[in-house]
């Protein structure tokens, strides 16, 4: 009896791990021939090869990029994640269609932790998403962004002095985190501490710890697979309990901030509110909700969506911008000539004065440089992984409900079809009049995604990037640390390692 049970169990596991994902992939491979690239691995799928590439070549995506360049006819990459087929679109026609029909592909919540970001703009769908997108749009207008420049300037300047700069990621993410917190809460969040650490440091660390626990710990992973997100709180290990406690503290601290602001706003007159030109995200939110409340609905303001919107913007805006900034600094260190050219542009434009909004569009070389870094090392190498909502015909491929799909931003941009000498880092390609991209359907180079669900923070990110780079380039000569080996790995986003890979020498 036991024997048969074991046999059945072994076959079941074999089926779930191998046959269930592999059979549909093989059928697609047969159907597509050279236009599909099959890269299956039990459980880990593509991740296995990415980690191997990091170990052997010092770059998470080196192997993938090589294979995609050697096989320019490949349009889809067939792999798996756990027991699910995972289709990576690497051709811009599929990418375009997926971005335009985003409603058919709900996002897959990578964090797998309830009540952090699932009610925010990044994860909601349908009407709820539309409402939030319209409301938040008010906080991302050029006028609103412009009003935050002095705050960004001050934060960058302070951190350039106070930070030891031995850990580039900590150095920059402090700045980008502070900018999101300040943009969201305004003055009341000054000096915010959570779990005894500066707010931005704790949130960045907490998200990283959740991801690490979820991806690296087999017990947590299996529990989440069986129990869903509730698994975090059931039969929790000491580490899981620690994470749960930190999440609770974070939520409570933020709730209190929101409550404080509601009381302050209730006390202010309409005229005072209108005058507040530098309205932060929270005020825009609360004013709208208070207005609704006044218009009759006696409903109390629900904290939950506001709280999760803050965490969403923090989650979406801190790591991304910080990782991209560090990657830019790494390229400036690798190419000292480029660093000098950018320094000259900055000096010609503003000498030693602070960055103002009128300077931003005139930083032509820096703009081209940022674009080129995005092309080769976009931290967001792909957007969120999506799920196929129902069986469907998608161009020439039949997708099945429940499969995972994603658009790769990093492959079209390294193909000869779209760029000349695509493997060469050359920011000047963006400065020529005729445009750098060949046979462009508009979805070849899209560092911030595209279509209705593109990055709402892209102008804020570009602004931050430029201001931070201007200050750092003027103040420091940035070079690679000769004592460590530079790698491009994954922390969730794709970026430079180790954290001490850069040296900052004060310019005289
Ligand atoms: C270099 C920096 C950044 C990069 C590369 C980046 C990239 C992206 C990409 C590719 C998406 C699309 C995701 C998807 O479709 O799955 C996205 C969405 C989003 N980004 Fe960014 N982002 C950056 C900075 C920011 C900043 C600074 C904020 C806000 C403070 C922000 C807020 C968001 C939000 C809320 C969404 C979801 C929009 C929606 O679904 O309607 N991002 N970002
Ligand atoms: C930029 O920040 C510095 C340092 O905090 C401050 O002295 C300066 O006035 C700021 N400049 C602008 C234009 O806000």
Image (cartoon, rainbow, N blue to C red):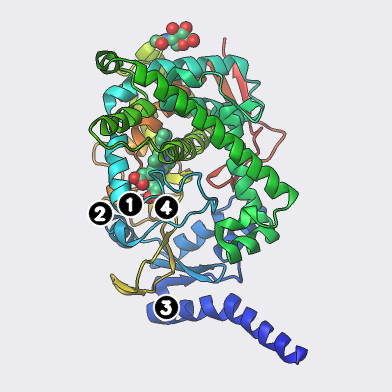
Q: Is residue 409 left or right of residue 101?
A: right
Mark 4 or mark 1: name the one nearer the start of the chain.
4
- The residue at which mark 2 appears reads as 441
Residue 164 place in picture, x, y as percent: 66, 21
Identify the secondary structure beneath mark 4.
helix
Marks 3/1: CA–CA distance: 24 Å
Q: Nearer the viewer, mark 2 or mark 4?
A: 2
- The residue at which mark 1 appears reads as 444
Relative vertical location of residue 495 with respect to residue 466 in this rendering, above or below? below
- Residue appearing at x 67%, y 83% in the figure: 9
Mark 3 or mark 1: name the one nearer the start of the chain.
3
Mark 3 or mark 2: name the one nearer the start of the chain.
3
Q: Is residue 182 left or right of residue 360?
A: right
Residue 440 place in picture, x, y as percent: 27, 52
Q: Which of marks 4 and 1 is in front?
A: 1
- The residue at which mark 3 appears reads as 28
Marks 2/4: CA–CA distance: 15 Å
Q: Is mark 4 within 8 Å of ligand 1?
A: no
In terms of depth relative to the viewer, which is nearer, 441 or 291?
A: 291
Asked if the residues shown at circle 2 and circle 1 are in contact, with their CB atoms under 8 angstroms apart, the answer is yes
- Pointer 1: residues within 10 angstroms few (<14), some, or many (20+)? many
């Amino acid at each position: 009896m036991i024997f048969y049970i074991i046999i059945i169990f072994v076959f079941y596991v074999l089926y779930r791990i191998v046959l269930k994902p592999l059979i549909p992939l093989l059928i697609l491979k047969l159907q597509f021939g050279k236009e599909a690239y099959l890269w299956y691995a039990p459980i880990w799928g593509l991740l296995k090869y990415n980690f191997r590439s990091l170990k052997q070549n010092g770059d998470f995506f080196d192997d993938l990029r090589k294979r995609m360049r050697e096989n320019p006819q490949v349009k889809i990459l067939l792999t798996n994640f756990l027991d699910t087929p995972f289709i990576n679109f690497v051709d811009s026609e599929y990418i375009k269609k997926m971005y335009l029909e985003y409603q058919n592909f709900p996002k897959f919540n990578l964090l797998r932790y309830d009540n952090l970001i699932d009610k925010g703009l990044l994860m909601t769908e349908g009407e709820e998403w539309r409402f939030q997108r319209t409301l938040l749009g008010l906080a991302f207008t050029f006028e609103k962004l412009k009003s935050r420049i002095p705050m960004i300037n001050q934060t960058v300047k302070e951190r350039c002095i106070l930070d030891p700069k031995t850990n580039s990621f900590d150095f920059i993410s402090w700045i980008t985190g502070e900018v999101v917190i300040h943009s969201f809460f305004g003055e009341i969040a000054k000096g915010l501490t959570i779990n005894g650490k500066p707010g931005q440091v704790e949130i960045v660390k907490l998200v990283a710890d959740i991801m690490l626990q979820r991806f690296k710990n087999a017990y947590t992973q299996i529990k989440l697979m069986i129990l869903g997100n509730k698994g975090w709180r059931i039969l929790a290990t000491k580490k899981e309990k620690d994470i749960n406690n930190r999440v609770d503290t974070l939520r409570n601290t933020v709730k209190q901030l929101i409550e404080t602001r509601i009381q302050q706003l209730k006390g202010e007159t309409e005229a005072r509110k209108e005058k507040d030109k530098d309205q932060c995200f929270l005020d825009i939110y609360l004013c709208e909700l208070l207005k609704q409340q006044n218009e009759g609905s006696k409903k109390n303001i629900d904290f939950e969506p506001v709280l999760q919107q803050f965490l969403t913007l923090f989650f979406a805006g801190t790591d991304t911008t910080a990782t991209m900034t560090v990657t830019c600094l790494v390229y400036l260190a690798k190419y000292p000539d480029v660093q000098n050219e950018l320094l000259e542009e900055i000096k010609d434009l503003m000498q030693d004065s602070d960055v103002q909004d009128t300077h931003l569009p005139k930083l032509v070389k820096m703009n081209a440089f940022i674009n080129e870094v995005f092309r080769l090392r976009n931290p967001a190498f792909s957007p969120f992984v999506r799920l196929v909502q129902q069986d469907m015909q998608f161009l020439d491929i039949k997708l099945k409900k429940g499969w995972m799909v994603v658009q790769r931003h990093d492959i079209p941009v390294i193909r000869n079809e779209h760029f000349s000498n695509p493997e060469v880092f050359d920011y000047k390609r963006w400065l020529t009049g005729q445009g750098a991209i060949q046979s462009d359907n508009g979805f070849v180079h899209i560092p911030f995604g595209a279509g209705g669900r593109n990055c709402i923070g892209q102008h804020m990110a570009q602004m931050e990037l430029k201001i931070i780079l201007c200050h750092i380039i003027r103040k420091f000569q940035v070079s690679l640390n000769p004592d460590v080996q530079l790698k491009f790995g994954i922390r969730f986003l794709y970026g430079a390692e180790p954290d001490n890979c850069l040296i900052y020498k004060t310019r005289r």
